[in-house]
Image (cartoon, rainbow, N blue to C red):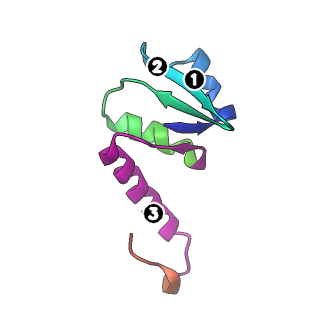
Amino acid sequence: LRFDAVTAEHLVDTPLSTDQHLQREGESTIVTATVSDTAQLRWWILGFGDRVEVLAPEALRQEIAQTCCKMAQQYQPREEVTPC
């Protein structure tokens, strides 16, 4: 996951897993951790909105991207909605 640096700060005190690693990259923080592939994980990621980007695994990245696309469609005028 790529978080904005401020949002990633909370993971210092509440890590995702025992093997979590945080790496600062400019104004972002890359977070790597071994986690279970669950609906709760998706809910947690989506709760960060535009302050997080899923980098891997690719299947999860695509799933979150698809969900975000569908969410964005709900805020477009009906005549401007493009398929995800």
Q: Is residue 19 left or right of residue 15?
A: left
Distance Cα–Cα, label 1 vs label 3: 27 Å
What secondary structure is found at the residue carrying circle 1? Answer: helix
Q: Position of residue 49 (x, y in %)?
A: 56, 48
Residue that mark 3 sits on: 69
State yes or no: residue 58 in magenta. Answer: yes
Q: Residue at x 39, y 75 (%)?
A: 83
Nearer the camera: disc 1 or disc 2: 2
State yes or no: residue 57 in magenta. Answer: yes
Residue that mark 2 sits on: 20
Q: Determine contact: label 1, label 2, CB under 8 Å.
A: yes
Choose the circle earlier in sequence order: 2 or 3.
2
Q: Residue at x 51, y 65 (%)?
A: 72
Q: Is residue 3 above or below residue 78?
A: above
Q: Amino acid at mark 3?
A: Cys
Q: Is residue 50 above or below residue 56?
A: below
Q: Amino acid at mark 1?
A: Leu
> Outermost residue, top direction?
18
Q: Is residue 55 left or right of residue 59?
A: right
What is the count of numbered marks?
3
Q: Which residues are magenta?
A: 50-77
Q: Amino acid at mark 2?
A: Gln
Q: Is residue 60 left or right of residue 49?
A: left
Residue that mark 1 sits on: 11
Distance Cα–Cα, label 1 vs label 2: 9 Å
What secondary structure is found at the residue carrying circle 3? Answer: helix
Image quarter of residue 84: bottom left
Choose the circle earlier in sequence order: 1 or 2.
1
